[in-house]
Amino acid sequence: MRADDTPLIRLEDYRPSDWLIDTVDLDINLHPQKTQVRALLGLRPNPAGRLGAPLILDGDELSLSGLRLDGLLIDESAYSATAQALTLHAPPQRRFTLTIDTQVDPSANTKLMGLYRSSRVYCTQCEADGFRRISYFLDRPDVMSIYSVRLEAAKLEAPVLLSNGNLVAAGEMAGGERHFAVWHDPHPKPAYLFALVGGALDHVRQDYVTADGRKVELAVHVEPGKAGRAGWAMDCLVRCMRWDERVFGRNYDLDVFNVVAVSDFNMGAMENKGLNIFNDKYVLADPQTATDGDYASIEAIIAHEYFHNWTGNRITCRDWFQLCLKEGLTVFRDQEFSADERSRPVKRIADVRTLRSTQFSEDAGPLAHPVRPRAYKEINNFYTPTVYEKGAEVIRMLKLLVGDDAFRAGMDLYFDRCDGTAATIEEFLACFAETSGKDLTQFARWYEQAGTPTIVASGRYDAAARTYTLDLAQTTAPTPGQPDKQPVVLPVALGLVGKAGDLPLVTGSAAYAGDGVIVLDQPSLSVAFSDVDEPPIPSLLRGFSAPARLELDLADADLLRLFSADSDSFNRWQALQSVASRALVSAGRSPGGHNALIATAGELAEALAGFLRVQAPADPAFAAQVLRLPVPADIAREIGRDVDPDAIHAAHRSLAAEIGLRLRPHLMELRERLGTSAAYRPDAASAGRRALRNEALGLIALADPEAGARLAEAQFAAADNLTDRLAALAAMTLVPGDAREALIARFAKTYAAEPLVLDKWLMAQALIAEAGTLDRVKGLMQHPAFSLGNPNRVRALIGGFAANLTQFNRPDGEGYAFVADMVVALDRTNPQVASRLLGSFKSWRMLEPARKALAEQKLAMVAQTPGLSRDVADIAERALA
Ligand code: PHE
Ligand code: ZN
């Protein structure tokens, strides 16, 4: 399918469904190749729809094997059935039932949408529109039904049979070979939240009593033999359930809650009602096979999917344009949970790093789109950092603008008013307008307007008048389809930092909202602060109070003061990042500015030396973030045009190496101090110590490769956990030579039976910034650990390579050629994985002319490939537009 032949679906064209489906009774006979599905639908005309309209049910690669209306066969002229649709030309204008028989082949389903088998486990993925690959249906989120599901399977093959809701019956079939289970979900839901699982699975179980007294049986199901790795996920689940009761007043609403880990999954996880299905990467954890980062991701994603039970399931989306209604809000909720469980500033820094590297880059390129897109060809391509991460930032700003109390009251009102419905952003915002008394009309622009705003700030101190005047202006660069931008509402949290800390903020300005927040909602404005006794240093956008770029020309000396004296932890971190970033941008723009870079390294090292000695040991997790420079991709985006990845990489390396060289004694001493003999524990404090030690190791390896290699080898040998071993491997990848190759081989041998660990091994190699990496990656495709059929393997090796700034962007274009070929190859089996990989080209327009031309050629090659999926065709078309 060519993208230009695909219809554009528009938000403004939304119409309610002409028909409703009140009940769905599914009877599913599981078989590896021939699964029989019988769906009994209880239909009625929608009073809000068009009277007398035909009934058009969606299908995707389906074939109809039987159809009855109110239990009776119907004339063939009364309907038509294709793979994509089942149409009843003149359905009765009353309640009636349809019994629809289809047969599907789960083993042949490589798209991993609908019903498929993953390592012999039957599972489903129905968001956004996978249910139509199981049965013909009104596959849209505003059609909500009560489901009863009977599953039948061979006992040996699928001893465990799960679906949504509560188990109501189970038993054996005559002969004893097959058995069945019947599940009932009392909560109406759209088809995208349907799920089933069947297979041989082990589990851990735990009883839970909700704050409002409901007994719930919690279970985490995993591949046989892996129950020992399910404990952490269960622990996270219990903690996030309590948190949602305490912080949002939300209780769980079924008698069971099941989590299942599968090894083939397109995304991270899925919030199916009462039956969350996970990519096993985000469930399985023990110290030998999961890193601290994995433990943290599992905590966040378990919480995310659980929180969807209210923000997504009890209240769902009217249509897919409202995707951020559930996703942005639920990301915000999981971020808050992690912040409460761990360190709030460190969590904020980590989230902002992710936002900048994924979302800012999306917003700066041809795939930019609003948090609520206005049109799409393929909805799968809109599960993006913009919808998720920027969507969460919008909620965070809303909370800051209306205040904690009105925010909580607004959420309560939303849960109250919209429970059981398929809602819109407008309905959501109306709740906060009501509880805060604020007009949120302009704020709503965050949902409509794409692009990252830039705040340009400058300040003037008048000693005689004892005033400090802050001038703020905002601009947003054009994005595809939106040439002219309007001002958005930017809450700018700030402080004026004096010699002895924050100065009092005294102003009569209407733009000052109190509590240290200026609301910049005009193209520009000035705020005058009075009674300012000394020239202050402005600390702006504290806590990253708005998802914007800040241009504020502070001298390095002032930034270094903020680093040591700002009361806002985020801005302390940001201040040092800003010093590094400015130097890297200028060195990356015009290579040769080496001396300036060395001077900056000196400044940074001096600031860090004291910090490492005095403060770092008290908060290692924060210190690890401080030691980590901005990533090269961030520098590329700041430069924005004619980007030369090699120059940026070289600048980054030399800055890090210089800092490492100067700090080496401090880093060694710190590593000694932080070295523990205690057994591994995954808690945030222990993880922070490891993070700092390993950050130090990386800097040492860059400064002194030989010493780094020796340290890495020793650390690998001594480590009792994967975090330290992987960090050793990562440090070693910075140092070419035999020792590196030996450690790579040793790692593979140690973890030969652990696919998820080998993914990290594949990725570490794919990220090596050397010309030999492309051949290495091609070679690794033949390694037994790799498979093109498994999304995690593909993301690790091919996705890792596509994220390798210098090697994906090789000057000879071979990096683009390789990734483009992989996209075309993958598209034949799994379009979603292919189109995500093609998204790696999203920043091609900012490259220098030679690379840009090569990247464009390869994109065009993909676009012209016959028989492309809609997913890939859509990305190729938009990337080239
Ligand atoms: N809704 C899932 C989540 O955010 C993501 C997802 C989308 C998973 C589409 C699968 C398919 O939790
Ligand atoms: Zn989600």
Image (tube, helix red, strand yellow):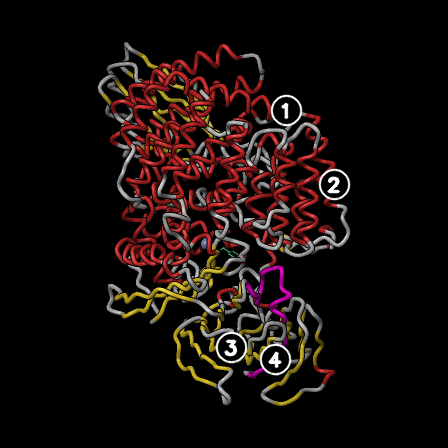
Residue appearing at x 74%, y 83% in the figure:
77
Is the C-beta separation of discs 3 and 4 under 8 Å?
no
Q: What is the secondary structure assignment of the residue under circle 3?
A: strand
Segment colored magenta? 96-118
Say which amino acid is labelled 1.
Answer: Asp
Given the image, on which type of amino acid does mark 4 rest?
A: Ile
Q: Which residue is mark 3?
A: 24
- Determine whether the residue tagged by mark 4 lies in a helix, strand or loop: strand
Residue type indicated by callout 3: Val
- Using a 10 Å C-alpha cutoff, classify the residue at mark 3 as few (fewer than 14 neighbours), some (14 to 19) or many (20 or more): many
Judging by the rendered image, the residue that carries numbered circle 2 is 860
Q: Secondary structure at mark 2?
A: helix
Residue 510 visible, this orientation: no
**Disc 1/disc 2 C-alpha distance (Å):** 20 Å
Q: Which residue is mark 1?
A: 642
Earlier residue among tags 1 and 2 = 1
Magenta region includes residue 758: no
Counting residues from the N terminus, which is met first, the one under dot 4 or under dot 2?
Answer: 4
